[in-house]
Image: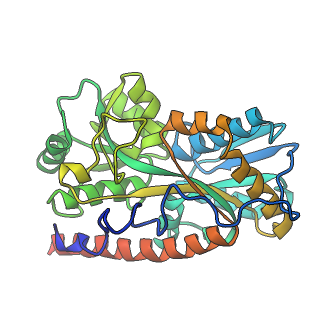
Amino acid sequence: MPSILKPLFLRRSCFCAVLLAYVCLQGVAAEACDATGDTPADMARLHFLVPGGAGGGWDSTARAVGEALRRSGLAARVSYENRSGGGGGVAIAHFIETAGRQQNTVFVGSTALVIRSLGGLLPQDIDELVPIASVVADYGALVVRADSPLQDFAQLSTAVAENPRQNKVAGGSVRGGMDHLVLELAMIAAGHPAGRVPYVAYDAGGQALTSLLSGETQVLSTGVSEVAAASDQGQVRILAITSPERLPELPEVPTLLELGVDAEFANWRGFFGPPGMTEDERKRIACVIETMTRTPEWETQRSRLALTNFVRRGTAFDAFLRDNRRQLDRLMDSVRAGKKAATQ
């Protein structure tokens, strides 16, 4: 294994989840909703502010949660607003600037925004928002069109490294963002130098997928949830994923680990409130969301997108975010060091 990867990944014998999650992904929040004044109540409405375009991971997660809330009767009405631009920065700025009129609104956040924040690429830090709850984890996927001559990850990594002009890789985040970082980690673990991946950035996963299907790019680095439907429809082939084990929803897709590529990565997604949100309001919405994740309506949505439950709320979510930020900072430092070494 290349030396820069050694501090990044822990073997499955040590933990049941990826480095970015210090607790098992299948776990639930420690602070369960109970009958002591912290019980779920029907919500008249809930509005989702999505920091990216339609078809991306933020968008699909928001709509899956909203649909499960509505169908389970936990929310009478749900609505969505896609405000893309700046890799999430436009939506964060809007949410903060209009906080006073954002009642019953939640912002969709994820690992990608923490990465951009650490890189100084956001006008306002995600830390200015109020953490409500995490819901799912989405693993990375390396994808080609169904008619691509690339049949497996070994062929993909060789083609991208040796013929970058003919094998451009699309992603739904900026360079240095989530999709780019997952691609870099996989390529480095496969033995290729850092910083030489022909990555083409798009504003959201939906746009990146369109570029793949149109032939504008030849490979896609994205989240499993963003290509699950296209895979089911026979439009794309997922060559490998970054989970520790194969997913029940994609039993034919190998993990990078089983292919001998020592790379695991998971992207959590969750919800935040505007600055100034009261603790009572945070608890109320968090409890509704947690209760939703135990409904059959949610299981239908989760399975459809091949997502993994990752429910944290209250102090459990706060603690996870602090730890996640520290670990991502170390990971990004290691990747930057690898890129610097590759140019010397």
Q: Which of these two is toward me, 79 or 169?
A: 79
Residue 183 in the figure: left or right of residue 128 = left
Horizontal arrangement in the rendering, residue 234 relative to residue 46 (left or right): left
* Left or right position of 277 against 1: right
Is residue 124 in view? no
The quarter of the picture where residue 20 lies is bottom left
In the depicted structure, whether residue 266 falls above or below residue 305: below
The quadrant the C terminus occupies is bottom left
In the image, farthest residue toward the front: 35
Q: Identify which residue is drawn at 59% across, 59% down.
A: 89
Vertical order, 162 against 188 (above or below): above
Q: Is residue 194 left or right of residue 282?
A: left
x, y (%) of residue 242? 34, 51
Q: Position of residue 87 (x, y in %)?
A: 52, 55
Residue at figure coordinates x 26%, y 43% from the top left: 168
- Looking at the rendering, in which quadrant would you find the N terminus? bottom left
Q: Is residue 14 visible?
A: yes
* Vertical comparison of 264 with 208: above or below: below
Q: How many marks?
A: 0
The x and y percentages for residue 106 are 73, 54
Name the one closer to the observer, 204 or 231. Answer: 231
Say which residue appears at 29% left-offset and 25% top-offset. 146
Q: Position of residue 52 (x, y in %)?
A: 57, 47
